[in-house]
Every structure is written in C-alpha cells, then in structure tokens.
Image (cartoon, grey):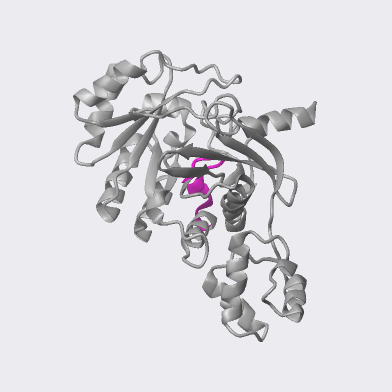
Amino acid sequence: MTDLKSMTLHEMRQALQALGQPAFRGKQVFTWLHRGVTSFDEMTDLPRSLRETLREHYTITAPKVARKQVSRIDGTIKYLWELGDGNCIETVLMQYHHGNTVCISSQVGCRMGCAFCASTIAGRVRDLTAAEMLDQVIFTQLDSGLPISNIVLMGIGEPLDNFDAVSRFLELVNAPEGMNIGMRHISLSTCGLVPGIRRLSELGWQLTLSVSLHAPDDQTRSRIMPVDRAYGVEELFQACHAYFQKTGRRISFEYALIDGVNDHDWQADLIAKKLKGMPGHVNLIPLNDVVESPLKPSKRLLAFQRRLESHGVTVTVRRSLGGDIDASCGQLRRKAMEEAEA
C-alpha cells in the first residue's frame, strides 16, 4: 500500500480528489498526519466511509520506541526507534536556552565509511522515506512533551546520499499546514557529496549547510573519509563557495579533532586559506571515543582553536551533550545490534 504521510499537501489533495472527495479533505488528512495520528480512526472529522476507503488504499507510518535514554546530566533524550520493517534508527533531542533541537537520521546505517563514526560500522541497510524522517520529529515531540523548534540532519546516514527523500522531508516539515518549522531552523550535514551540494544550492533554500570537513588536505582526509577519494578537498571547497554565492548562507564546517591526525598548526593554517572569500564558520568537535576505532581525541583543541582565530576565522567548540546515554551517533543502534547477535 502507498505511504500517505510522504505526500505533499498538493499530492494529498489530488489523491483525495481521485477518490471522489473535495480538495479540502486532503488538507484535513495532511493536518491529522502531521499531528501524529497512528490510525485513520483518529481522523474524527472525516466520514466513516472515507476512513474505510483510506485504510484500504494507504498506510500510516508510526515508529515504536525500542529504547529511550534520558541524560541525568543535561536532560538530553536519545531514542532508538523501531521502524515498520524491524530496522532501528536513532534520534536525539537536545535542550538549549534558545529552544529544543532534534537530531534525526536519514538512512538505516551509512555507507560513507568515515573512520571516526559509529554509524557506518555495519554499513548502509536502506534509505529512510520522507515519512520516516518526519516521524522522528513528530513522535519525539509527542513522546517527550517538548516543543521542537530546530532540526539537524546529523544522525545516522548521509542526507545527500538520500537526496530525493530528504528534500521531500524538508518540504513537508516546512509546510505551514504541518509542523511549520522554517528552513532557517534546519541544518543539514554532509560528508562532502559534491553533486548533492550543487543540487541543494539550486533549490535556494535558506537552511544551514554543515560540511563534515575533518581535514583540509586530501592526504589526511582520504585516510579518514573515503568520500574524499571521489570528491577531493579542492572540488569540495569550490562547491561550498558556489553554494554561498547562490544562497548567501554561511556554511558551517564540522571538524572532529583527532590526536596526531588532523590537529596540526599547518592544517589550521590551510583551513583559513581555503575559507578566504567565504564567511565560513568552523565548529570544532571533541572526538567521541568509539571503542572500535583506534582514533583518539586530540589534546590540542585549545591550541588549534587559537591558531584558527589568529587568522580571523570564526570558531566554536561543540558542547558535548548526553555523554552518559550513548548520545553519539550510531552508538545505541550498534549496542542493540550486538545484544541481538549475542
């Protein structure tokens, strides 16, 4: 059966009209779905006969909470959601003074192979649908009771490797008749899929693009990020400059500092050189200590930060949240998989 929640409002109106219903029924169904109903019986302002017809032709996605962990330190909540086919994904809800941010997954697993990431250890299983991404926002808000004002696509998976479904999700979550979360409150993180960056720039959306850089030179970056072998640093920065020219949006460059690998002064100097002419922002990340990885957190975070700032680069250091609940991307899913195999 057809996944109803992945439809745009326009498509839903057409679908209802094809069933002989007036167009306004499409808006009613759209609104119900974005409120988080899990069955057609909950759509109480629809005729019973229409609800029966919808049940015959369409399905409503709704994940189940497989695990939920709440940090005693900062209130961060991590969900392991079980999808309709039994696969699991992670979502993290982080509380800040400026509002609540949900970090969602875009794929079940990941095939990018970044050496420092737990999400990619078991590889990619499949892409998520737009509805399954939307569900993470809707049901995290419903379960936690906390209103969500910001979204980051930085969970399991590479968003630009699932471009069509991700762009549809962004259109859905931005819809005024739905959750109405503005593009400026959404961040999308990519490991550097250049064709996807170029496609995204053509849409002209005002979201924040975050690029997982992690090294400014091909020799280092290709060792820890296989994507660099397909799209090198020079090509990546050309796409980033073009993105800024097209959208006017400052790009955030994510940089996880790895001891003895990417934390040298000359690498900070090279980042500053490549950012010239573009108002980029570098977000330094204390590396998560993944047990399976030989890569360890850098001891030079402060020195690296000062080196970048000496060149006039805007730098922040990401605050670590949920350290007591496996909040790092992929860790909870990996733990559940290991327990299932035991």
Query: Along the line of sight, which residue is nearer the eye, 16 or 92?
Result: 92
Query: Along the line of sight, which residue is nearer the eye, 68 or 187?
Result: 68
Is residue 137 positioned above or below 40 on the image? Answer: above
Q: Position of residue 241 (x, y in %)?
A: 27, 45
Q: Residue at x 39, y 49 (%)?
A: 197
Q: Is residue 155 magenta?
A: yes
Left or right for 88, reference 284: right
Q: Is residue 13 magenta?
A: no
Q: Is residue 64 visible?
A: yes
Residue 36 appears in which quarter of the rendering?
bottom right
Quadrant where the C terminus lies? top right
Residue 26 appears in which quarter of the rendering?
bottom right
Left or right for 340, reference 229: right
Is residue 286 positioned above or below 96 on the image? Answer: above
Query: Along the line of sight, which residue is nearer the eye, 304 or 199?
Result: 304
| Residue numbers of the magenta segment | 152-164
Q: Residue at x 60, y 28 (%)?
A: 326
Q: Position of residue 211 (x, y in %)?
A: 39, 39
Q: Residue at x 31, y 44 (%)?
A: 240
Q: Is residue 1 visible?
A: no
Left or right for 311, reference 334: left
